Amino acid sequence: MAQYESAFLTIEWDGSIEAVIMNWTDFAEGEEYREGLNKGLEVIEQHGAENWLADLREMGAVSQEDQEWTRNEWHPRAFETSLTNMAIIQPESVVAEMSVDDLVQEIGEETTIQIFDNREDAKTWLDEQ
């Protein structure tokens, strides 16, 4: 069931794997990008979720400014929540993949992250955590 919907993102709660599912369907930057990530945190807090699945296949590159915001603002808040497992489905664009790789390197010590190329493997991994 969708918890949030916009032109570029749908956020769902999947109770079967107790995960917040972020379905990025288009490029987003600035306020749109930040609002999406902040809404994801709200869903984590609502459910006490430990699992996060971000499907970034259609997302596009994250701007330098948004990467800095993610590192400096969002990551510290995210890693204070119950979040412990992150499954990332890599973007199809090589440029977008590089920007995601930079952000993944900033993941906190208490969080395990795995990169996947499809949703089924990502969900299986989260279900096993």
Image (spheres, grey):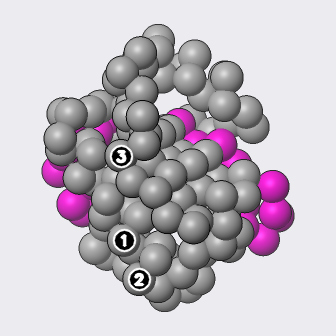
Distance from disc 3 to disc 1, alpha carbons, whole Å, reads 13 Å
Label 2: how many residues lie within 10 Å, few (<14), some (14-19) or many (20+)? few
Label 3: how many residues lie within 10 Å, few (<14), some (14-19) or many (20+)? some
| 117 to 64, vertically: above or below | above
Q: Residue at x 46, y 57 (%)?
A: 5
| 127 to 28, vertically: above or below | above
Q: Would residue 60 be found to the left or right of residue 113 on screen?
A: right
Picture quarter with the N terminus: top left
User: Which residue was labeled with disc 1?
Assistant: 35
User: Which residue was labeled with disc 3?
Assistant: 3
Q: Amino acid at mark 1?
A: Glu
| 121 to 86, vertically: above or below | above
Q: Secondary structure at mark 1?
A: helix
Front position among marks 3 and 1: 3
The reply to whether discs 1 and 2 touch (Cβ–Cβ < 8 Å) is yes
Q: Secondary structure at mark 2?
A: helix
**In this orientation, does residue 99 appear?**
no
